[in-house]
Image (cartoon, helix red, strand yellow):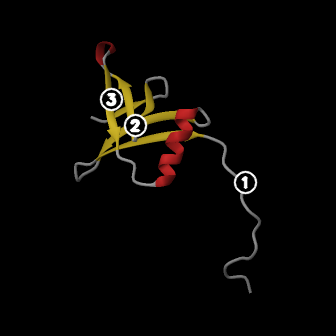
Amino acid sequence: MWLETNNQNFEISKQGNFYTVAFNLLRGRKGRIPLDVHASSHTEILEKIIDGSAKLGSLKLCKSKKGIWYALISVSMEVPGAGEVKGWIGAG
């Protein structure tokens, strides 16, 4: 069974060069698992979560058919506006 929780029941932290996600378990116990970050853009978002410039949404821990676990974390943050369109594909 997958774990899904809101932003009140988990936290992201960094210890040295490693990121972890901690979440509440039964009877006040806390589980902490390391995150293996594959893209530098994900690292930037995790840093924004830790410094408070991005707001946590929900967490879902999912297991793939190949047995790989994934942490799906929703985040709310400011993003830059879209740039000016300089041309259209297929315009003739």
Q: Is residue 49 left or right of residue 53?
A: left
Mark 2 belongs to which amino acid? Gly
**Mark with earlier residue (3, 2):** 2
Q: Which residue is mark 1?
A: 81
Quadrant hosting residue 63 = top left
Q: Residues under labels 3 and 2: Cα distance?
A: 15 Å
Mark 3 neighbour class, 10 Å CA radius: few under 14, some 14 to 19, many 20 or more: some
Q: Residue 18 or 35: which is nearer the viewer?
A: 18
x, y percent for residue 2: 31, 36
- At label 1, which amino acid type do we have? Gly
Task: Tell me the residue that label 2 is attached to.
Answer: 16
Q: Position of residue 41 (x, y in %)?
A: 51, 53
Q: Earlier in the sequence, mark 1 or mark 3?
A: 3
Quadrant of the drawing holding the C terminus: bottom right
Q: Is residue 63 above or below residue 26?
A: below
Q: Are the two marked residues, 1 and 2, in contact with CB atoms closer than 8 angstroms?
A: no
Residue corresponding to mark 3? 32
Q: Residue at x 45, y 28 (%)?
A: 11
Packing grade of label 1 (10 A; few <14, some 14-19, many >=20) is few
